[in-house]
Image (cartoon, grey):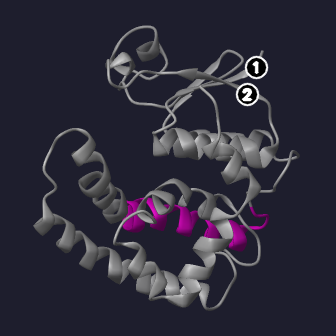
Amino acid sequence: MAIKVHGNPHSPAAQRVIVCLEEKGLEYDTVLIDLRSREQKKEPFISINPFGQVPGFEDGDLKLYESRAITKYIAHVYADKGTPLLLEGPKKLGTLYLWLEVEVQKFDASAQKIAYEILVKPVKGMTTDEAAVEQLIVQLSDVLDVYEARLAESKYLTGDSFTLADLHHLPVINNLYKTKVKSLFDARPHFSAWCADILARPAWKKALEAKY
């Protein structure tokens, strides 16, 4: 049975799953979930994700949700396919797990909220909270200083190899490139070079072109 991704091309979380599948060179089918009509809150989708958020994921009779859980599953189960996205050995795994948490707890905690304020709210006819954006930018700047120091030491977050820790950043970084936040990236040469590197990956370009 084919792998299926139930999502939307505008969803960063769905993009995260798609790029992981592309890095692994796996075949998959996409199922469009119409977010405007709130299809994600209705059956049959909520039988996959009871929280009513994209993406939903099927691999045979297995159903998963939460994009980062899905990518971890893909990386482990299909470890012998495509790009190795994990690391071997307890110390290397420790570093990988660390940066996976940093992405969620530190980077995304600020970056995704900024993207929502600047990019999503206007589309929904809502007003961007500029004061909140400025506060979030200060928070993100502190986080990026830590990234800059790390990336001055290694090409990727966990060392010399591209892993899930890098991959998980792609959708939000791509979105923020379209905003004034890019100046924060440009001001940090190692972080900026890392962004350019991962955004240029063929798998990411394919993910952006995924058809639903």
* 131 in relation to 39, above or below: below
Write the start and end of the magenta stretch as one range: 87-108
* 152 in relation to 210, above or below: below
Residue 191, how many percent across, how many down? 54, 81
Please tell me in which quadrant of the rendered image residue 165 appears: bottom right
Which residue lies at the image location 34% right of the left edge and 81% below the top edge?
141
Direction from residue 68 to residue 143 in the image, left or right? left
Between the C-alphas of marks 2 and 1, the distance is: 6 Å
Which residue lies at the image location 36% right of the left edge and 63% below the top edge?
111
Please tell me in which quadrant of the rendered image residue 41 appears: top left
Which element is circle 2 on? Answer: strand
Question: Residue beneath label 2, please?
Answer: 28
* 106 in relation to 147, above or below: above
Residue 96, how many percent across, how many down? 63, 66
The outermost residue toward the right is 80
Residue 90, how many percent across, how many down? 72, 68
Question: Residue beneath label 1, please?
Answer: 2
* 131 in relation to 147, above or below: above
- The amino acid on which the numbered mark 1 sits, given as a three-letter code, is Ala
